[in-house]
Image (cartoon, rainbow, N blue to C red):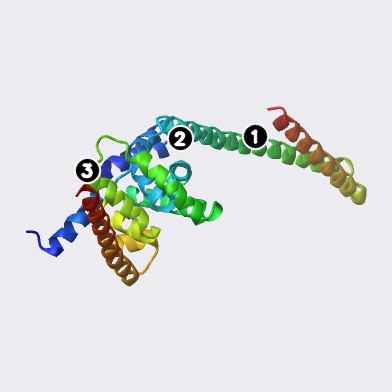
Amino acid sequence: MKKPDEKDEEILNRISSSKLELRNIYFEDKCMRLIRKQTDLDNAYISCYRKSIGFYLAGILICLAIICFSLIAYQENIMFSLLLQAFLTGVICYIIIQIRDKVYATR
Amino acid sequence: MNDNSIDQEYIAKVCYGDSESFGFFISKYKNLLFTYAFTILKDSQLAEEAVQDAFLNAFRYLKSFKNKSSFKTWLIKIAINEANKKRKQIIPHIILSERFNENLLDNSDSPELNDNIEIIQYALNRVAKEKSLVLRLFYLDEYSIKEIAGIMQWGIPKTKITLHRAKKEIVKIVKELQSKKDEKAG
């Protein structure tokens, strides 16, 4: 005859066999598909960042070139030179951002 | 090679870019996470979705896993959080407990289960979800009180009291069920 405490322990120990089973045979495939999509997304982000940096660097170099050119070409008229720099820098930045957006939209 | 070191090996592979290696963890831990998700949600479909979300989050944040606990414990925490999130989003408790009976039958169809296991499963679903979780963490995965407190984000006194009450409650339920079963048999 089992003591009450032993009976209780026996009941509680049955919990160690209470693991359930995920029956869906497609579950692992479904999960892996999601993982692959996530990987592709992460890789696409990295590629986007690299291209963005490329565009911005190109923009900065063009702006620097304009600034140098206007400083050399319009040395006498500093105000005009500054206005020209500011205007052309703004235009070039705008064009580069538009090109970048169009490139991404067509991917 | 122990369990944890095998997990570490696969974590390193995934972090180095071999995302296919994550399939090892899905295969190894899906049933365990499903058990805990089902404890909270009491619905197979919802538990499956919670487990899926848990694996996806684990993959996304794998690089932030800092080895403060074992990888299994980390996964269990994520699964419990996902299940709790889902539970807050969806249908009220009444519908959950109505669905429970159908799902229990589905899960007890397996040839390995016997009456005693069915009874314990039923009893685990009768007690409150926190108590059921604590019981499973203690007996199924043999976590210590301190580890369970960490997983549940409780203090140690609360964990001890909940476990103690849960044990008493489940023993009472099982004894009631067994005596009803014996009455029917007799």
Q: Please identify, in this view, whether the residue under mark 2 or under mark 1 is nearer the observer.
A: 2
Closer-to-camera residue (B18/B172): B172
Q: Secondary structure at mark 2?
A: helix
Residue B73 shows in the view: yes
Q: Nearer the viewer, mark 3 or mark 1?
A: 3
Mark whose residue sits in front, 3 or 2: 2
Marks 2,1: beta carbons within 8 A:
no
Q: Callout 3, which amino acid?
A: Asn
The CA span between labels 3 and 2 is: 26 Å
- Relative to B160, B14 lies left or right: right
Decide which of B14, A73 is in the foreground and name it: B14
Q: Disc 3 is attached to a residue of which chain?
A: B
Circle 3 packing at 10 Å, graded few (<14), some (14-19), many (20+), is few
Q: Where B30 sits versus B75, above or below?
A: above
**Earlier sequence position, callout 2 versus callout 1:** 2
Chain ID at mark 1: A
**Residue lying furthest bottom in this view?**
B157
Instruction: Indicate the secondary structure of the residue bearing disc 3.
Output: loop
- What's under tag 2, amino acid-wise? Cys
> From mark 2 to mark 1, how far is it between C-alphas?
30 Å
Residue designated by label 3: B2
Amino acid, disc 1: Lys
In this view of the protein, which residue sits in the foreground, A65 or B56? B56
The residue pinned by badge 1 equals A51
Rendered image quadrant of residue A87:
top right
Residue occupied by mark 2? A31
Do marks 3 and 1 both belong to one polypeptide chain? Answer: no
Residue A14 image point, x, y percent: 22, 51
Do the residues bearing badges 3 and 2 touch, measured as CB atoms within 8 Å?
no
